[in-house]
Amino acid sequence: MYQRRPIRKSVFSYIMPLVVIIAIFLMVILGWKMLNIFFGTSAATTQNERVFLNIEQGSAKAMTAELSQWQNAPDKIYLYQGEQAKTGADSRITLTYFDQSIMRLNNNSEIRLNVLKKNKSTVIIKTTLNQGEAWAKIGPLGDSGSSFAIDTSLLNIDSEDAIVSIVAPGLVRVIKGTVDVGIKYDDAVIKAVTLGIGQELNISEEDISKLNSGGKVELVNAWIEDFTKSDWYLWNSQKDGTISAYEESDKANIPAEKANPATSTTKSADSSIITPTASPAIVAQDQGVISKVVYVLSPSLQTATNKDFFDMKGHYDPKIAAAIFVDDLKAVLSQETSTWEVQKIKFSKEGINTFQISATDLKGAKIKLDDFNIIYDKTPPVVPIIIEPGLTGAVVPIQLTEQIIKGIVSADTQKVIVNDYALGKYVPGSKEFSYYAKVAYGNLMSGENQYQIFAEDKAGNLSGSAIITLVLDSKAIGDAETPTATPTTDKNGSSQPPVPLQGASSTGAGVVITDPNGGKDLTTSETFFEIKGTAPANTSGIFVNDYKLSAYQLGNAEWKYRASVQLGNLKPDQKNYFTVVAYDAKGDKLGEASLTIILVSEKLSAPVITIPTDKNSYSTNLNVITIGGTVNAVAEEVYLNGEKINYEDKSGKWRKSVTLTPGDNVFRVYATQGEQKSGVAKITIKYY
């Protein structure tokens, strides 16, 4: 019988179906990608790589990928890579990037979002300012590979953590941090400079052509004073909740409608500290759409401080949030102004402290919010080291009317302070500093000139002082030390008033101390103060305890003097007297004011009775006896049975003779410090 042999299948016949399936899968994937290229949005249009546009004033326009032409932009929309935005003659907008960096555009300004990328912790952002004026609050970014760059036709501005003001095409001012600026010629960078706080670069096309040809161009200068008084500077400073390290914002100059959220006529209500839409550091998710519920207005995220406590303030939407908490502390809410505040929040450790900010809605449901980090730093920088014209502590004779002082500071230094003057051209983080002492500046005179140099970090901690003394031979200057009424400008950008004529004196009362404590004497445990006040318009120079304020400028209405334990002009456990005297250009005295600060380093405690015994009771047959003892040095007054007794302030000892009556006599003693009252010590003395 014939049997059919089975047919053997080849290996290819088994593999072929699998190959077909894989090919179909690849074609589907490729086709999907092609559809995305031609009809979809790019990969940059993700939740993590977009920019939130908020219209602060007026109206704005945007050019989106879908429309490819300028259209009126609605408020609170997202923009993506390649898209553009611009403001009109009466408008300002805020752009919040996906990394929480912020850019604000002044009127008649235009930007393009060139690159928006994020890969794990690395952030790459490139924006072009085509025209107008921008204020950028950058970073801090994720890692060393991250970058936030702003281009104009003449400049490339790059930073990882800074606040910078830019006017296209060639003006850059640094408000905080440092920025690297590349100067471009035919779109190629031909020169790179680094700018620090208080510095600006202002360059034109003609300057760049000259620079490209090998010519010399002054690139870096200090800000002009008018910038810090401008509406643009004040408006942005208020929104950031910060001011420059070298200037103080005059909040009285800010229009009322920008200072009161209840009366604001702009699209986003402004607070007295910062407009919430400018810094949406904390937002709640509502079905995929960001809902502006709670904002932290101050302090700023990642702020560094050396204070043990701080207050947190913010803005919220009363239509959504019913309660707000910082950790376990409940905020005080004001529905009228839509603001909230938690006072005296304490740090748990040095370094980064994370605070959980939470909220509940009107139904009691919890709203999830982001954590908020603040750096608590009590460690001061290393004491500066002076290297020229002598080492720290040196007494150096000099014959010339000017001398440069150079030295080294630690990398955490944000400011270098010589006496009471912060060096305007010092770049934070730089390891070297320079200071010019010059007869013409008024900071170098014949005889001994002592210079105390301090380093200050981001948290406000001051280092100990490095001291150098320059001894100028009076023969070297002759009559050059005689002051004139003409101010000069030093190489650090500080205008110096003339030195008052010695011996000139007249009466006057034009000097007023306004801070601290409204100019009234105070007792405190604070170890640092900025003593501030006002002076007559014709003031040429101001002296505090015979020390000339070298940073005071001719004709300024306001003056400032720093007093602290670390500076050595504020002593603990004693009275510190400060006398402020103003002189005119002729050296005549215009007026003076004084302030006493009692610095206490101990807590007020109950007195101790040691006479006639340290026991709680005592017996005697004498009808007149002395009661006495000790009290800690912070006590200002001592009371025995409610009657103030003679007590030598800060002596630590007290005593009082008393007349006894037959039987038990009870005596109670306590001390006071200002309005504070100590505990009570008691003794019973039996007279028989």
Image (spheres, helix red, strand yellow):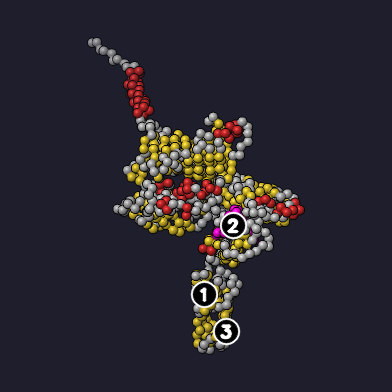
Name the residue tied to disc 3. Answer: 625
User: Residue 473 at x, y = what percent?
Assistant: 75, 53
The residue singled out by tag 1 in the image is: 670
Q: Is residue 6 magenta?
A: no
From the viewer's perspective, tell me whether residue 155 is left or right of residue 25. right
Crowd class of label 3 (few under 14; some 14 to 19; many from 20; radius 10 Å): some
Circle 3 SS class: strand
The residue segment tinted magenta is 533-555
Residue 381 vs residue 611, the one in the foreground:
381
Q: Is residue 574 left or right of residue 295?
A: right
Front-most of 438 and 58? 58
Q: Is residue 524 above or below residue 494?
A: below
276 is higher (above) or lower (below) than 33: below
Q: Is residue 186 visible?
A: yes
Residue at the right extreme of this rendering:
475
Which element carries disc 1, helix, strand or loop?
Answer: strand
